[in-house]
Image (cartoon, rainbow, N blue to C red):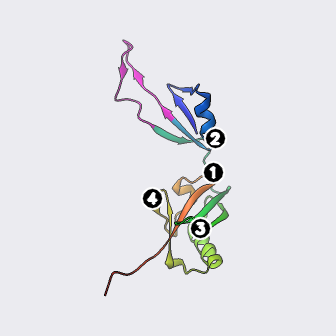
Amino acid sequence: MKLLLHGKMSADEEASKSLPSNSKTIAVSTEQNKEGAVNTNAGALKVTDEKAPAANEYICLHIITSDFTNEVRFRVKAGSAFIRLKRSYCSKMGFEVDQVRFMFDGYRITDDDTALKLGMTDNDIVEIYQEKTGGGM
């Protein structure tokens, strides 16, 4: 991550060493009027991708169980439907597709979603949760 403040990179070397150099940039800006007064309502924090993959580009996704006991890496095309990854993961791990939920940034991934549609980049993490039923007596 890189921190941009008023269009300039952060000069704090310690901060830049501690931040991972991945594909996200955080931009913070403010606007000034003609008199030089700063508009405090302008310049909301926004995160932008430096490099969004093309639909036919391959990206690596890390599939991690909710308890962090298992991690599987998949190399997929950014434009491929997730049903292919779901079937492959489930056959490899011995699950049925409807027994697990695939989540990315708090969003449940549907069968027709793609990495491109969800804004995924290389080395993003997809979490797996097992469907649980119960509570009835």
> Circle 3 — which element?
loop
Q: Label 3 belongs to which residue? A: 69
Residue 26 disc label: none
Residue 121 horizontal/vertical position (percent): 60, 52
- Image depth: mark 1 or mark 4 in front: 4
Q: Label 1 belongs to which residue? A: 53
Mark 1 → mark 4, Cα distance in angstroms: 21 Å
Which residue type carries mark 4?
Gly
Mark 1 → mark 3, Cα distance in angstroms: 29 Å
Mark 3 → mark 2, Cα distance in angstroms: 26 Å
Which is more toward the observer, 72 or 23? 72
Label 3, residues with CA under 10 Å away: few <14, some 14-19, many ≥20: few
Residue 40 vertical placement versus 90 (above, below)? above
Image: magenta residue range: 27-45
User: Mark 4 near mark 3, Cβ–Cβ under 8 Å?
Assistant: no
Residue in view at x 62 percent, y 77 percent: 93
Q: Is residue 38 left or right of residue 60?
A: left
Residue 116 horizontal/vertical position (percent): 57, 55
Q: Label 4 belongs to which residue? A: 106
* Earlier sequence position, callout 1 versus callout 3: 1
User: Mark 2 near mark 1, Cβ–Cβ under 8 Å?
Assistant: no
Residue 88 vertical placement versus 5 (above, below)? below
